[in-house]
Image: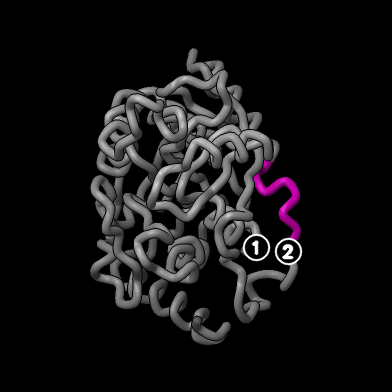
Amino acid sequence: MLTGAELKNQVDNCVEQIRRVTDFVPDVALILGSGLGAIADEIDSVASVDYHDIDGFPVSTVSGHKGRFVFGKIGETKVVIMQGRVHYYEGYSMQQVVLPVRVMAGLGAKILYLTNAAGGINTYFDAGDLMVIKDQISSFVPSPLIGENVDEWGVRFPSMNDIYDREYVEMIKDTAKDLGIVLRSGVYIQTTGPQYESIAEIEMFRGFGADAVGMSTAVEAIVAKHLGMKVCGVSCITNMAGGTPDKPLTHEEVKETADRAAANFKKLVTESISKLS
């Protein structure tokens, strides 16, 4: 585990390398989950930087995650987009998993917009639904704030009340209504993965009040909150968690459903981000 000084130096070095390519200062950092990669290909971009070209930066090993930063505008909102994220289950340390959020904050982003593909725990949800995240449970993954605190970033014991900005949650709901998109609202729980949840685990999570489960997002939100960023997020419910007894869940099924829901997902994300300017 890096010391606070080493971690800050790593973040600063990544920012410096990106600054050699572009001086673009984003307002919003957007992390794209499964099914949303096309957004980064379609925006009015001014620059892109592959993760491989940044010394010390983690690189995604998951199919469907390109692995680059894209800089540009969605509407009039200046954004830096992560086209592909890294996950704890890939073998990276938690410090590496959340490094991109710290780097994007270092580039100037004040808002973090999170997206993901998630399993539905709430029995009223259907595959293909979209869910605005109103709160989260991160107790099943290591805290990304473990280790020496960097006081410049935030306090040692930060509050996680209203981790998802209430104003932005309501704005995303209103945007969905304007677009005629059915939008659920719920609590997201993160697990380490890479295995999917057992039936008993799903029942346990449901008892905790979770509506959707996935293998990312919560730790990124924690770090953003620690940094003083405002946070919002949307999940695509690609399946009912764990699948069914006669049809176990597969990664291919998750990707297929995410692709089918991509049109509405993309419209909601881009339209709501355009309002953040």
User: Which residue occupies 62% across, 39% down?
Assistant: 204
Compared to residue 31, the image places residue 14 above or below, namely below
Which SS class for mark 1?
helix
**Hey, what amino acid is under mark 1?**
His
Picture coordinates of residue 191 (x, y %)? 51, 51
41 sits to left or right of 273: left
Picture coordinates of residue 243 (x, y %)? 40, 30
Residue 208 makes an appearance in the image: yes
Q: Main secondary structure of the magenta part?
A: loop
* Residue hosting label 2: 158
Mark 2, Cα crowd under 10 Å, few <14 / some 14-19 / many 20+, is some
**Hey, what amino acid is under mark 2?**
Pro
Picture coordinates of residue 55 (x, y %)? 30, 77
Picture coordinates of residue 181 (x, y %)? 48, 17
21 sits to left or right of 11: left
User: Which residue occupies 42% across, 36% down?
Assistant: 75
* Residue hosting label 1: 226
Tag 2–tag 1 contact (CB < 8 Å): yes
Pick whichever of labels 2 and 1 is earlier in the sequence. Answer: 2
Real-space Cα distance between discs 2 and 1? 6 Å
Question: From the image, which quarter does the C terminus lie in?
Answer: top right
Residues 134 and 14: in front is: 134
Mark 1, Cα crowd under 10 Å, few <14 / some 14-19 / many 20+, is many
